[in-house]
Image (cartoon, helix red, strand yellow):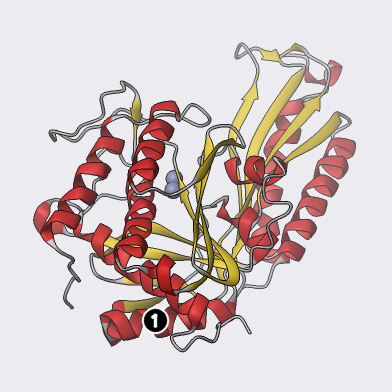
Amino acid sequence: MTVASLNQEFSDWLVQLRREFHRFPEPAYKEFKTAETICRELKRLDVPFEKGVGGTGIVARLQAVNSGLLIAYRADMDALHLEEANDVAYRSQNTGYMHACGHDGHMTIALGILRRLKDTGWHANGAGEILFIFQPAEEGGAGARAMLDSGFFDDKPVKAVFAGHLYPELPVGQFGIAENICNAAADLFAIRLTGKGGHGAHPHQCKDPIIAGAHLVVQFQNLISREIDPLASAVVTIGQFHAGTAANIIPETAVLNGTLRTLQPDMRERLIARIRDMVTGTAKSFDVEGSFEIKDGYPALINDPKLVAHAIKTTTEVFGGDATRIERPRMGSEDFSFFCQQWGGFMIGIGCHNPHEGFQYGLHSSHFNFDENALVAAVLLFENLLKRYLDGGNGKSLAE
Ligand SMILES: [Zn+2]
Ligand SMILES: [Zn+2]
């Protein structure tokens, strides 16, 4: 497998830009300097844009001379609360923050695609229009939802939306794509059990919420092992169980916080209903009060199979038969799902693993870093995916 290349000046520009983003990581909805850098590059590329969409979001607009379809490409902007462990010249300058999910790369790739489309004169010959969406707050802040809720896209009939995510599990030069379900839905829930506190030596005078909570944690394990198809996947994790202040006191309350990960909407609904049932039933059987609250997280990210076929065909034609890998769904979540729900689209994994150069750590690791050759490969891939989608290589759109 060979990694595609563009001229040296272009590659150097990509690397420099990525390192600039990397040095100044900013958290959700505070991507101010990041947004400034994006705007600076958009001005240099002479591409019109709107800023302040859904907070710190930016939407750039590249229009071709001929009328045609409207599509979108999305890159996320935010960094993680994490101290960088890498000792590199472009190490994070913002203490406690790090681009450990590759979003520095994603923004660079988006700008790279824009520049390639301009350099190759697509806008002067092609048909259609592409919105480049720079989205804040992917890491838990639902920035995609905020951008959609801003109303900016209400009068824009986007036909399909594309995105890439660096995948350190894949070698640089390779791309991974899930044929349908790409990422799980993630919801957070909180359970509160209220009993009657008292002396640990007099349990008969109390109502013990810890016993009820312990039973609940065990019961939830049966949801996965006994109530869903063994070939399907879901996760129920109780990550927090808070109760009590001393060994000889039965506390008044116990609080359990958990996360639910599912791949299909109907399974999500069913498991939420069953968790609620279990809280009510278990609370009743232990004679305590139980409350259950769920906070909707990100929906599952579903790739549109028709678009996936286009992606696989293009990847194979541009990079050869061994460049594409069909990926299994991932239990992590991704708020690009909001855009896909709205318009239909897909996310492609961009291989960036290269242990010979020390790039072998996973996303969200304080050691995460990636082979920057992945930037050029991704730019070339998406340049082709977008162009071919809009003109189908022969003037006929693939969307028809
Ligand atoms: Zn992440
Ligand atoms: Zn990410």
Task: Give the left or right position of residue 385, taking residue 70 as reference.
Answer: left
Vertical position of residue 362 compared to residue 245: above or below: below
Image quadrant holding the N terminus, namely: bottom left
Residue pictured at 49% horizontal, 26% vertical: 30
> Disc 1 designates what residue?
314
Position in image of residue 28 (x %, y %): 50, 32
Q: Nearer the viewer, residue 235 or 154?
A: 154
Residue pictured at 31% horizontal, 20% vertical: 95
Position in image of residue 368 (x %, y %): 27, 44
Residue pictured at 34% horizontal, 70% vertical: 381
Position in image of residue 4 (x %, y %): 20, 71
Q: Label 1 is placed on what type of residue?
A: Thr
Crowd around label 1: few <14 · some 14–19 · many ≥20 (10 Å)? some
Local SS, label 1:
helix
Task: Give the left or right position of residue 251, taking residue 166 as reference.
Answer: right
Q: Is residue 201 visible?
A: yes
Position in image of residue 348 (x %, y %): 43, 66
Image quadrant holding the C terminus, namely: bottom right
Q: Nearer the viewer, residue 12 or 124?
A: 124
**Quarter occupied by residue 279:** top right
Ligand 1 falls in quadrant: top left
Residue pictured at 71% horizontal, 25% vertical: 254
Q: Nearer the viewer, residue 183 or 235?
A: 183
Vertical position of residue 180 compared to residue 353: above or below: below
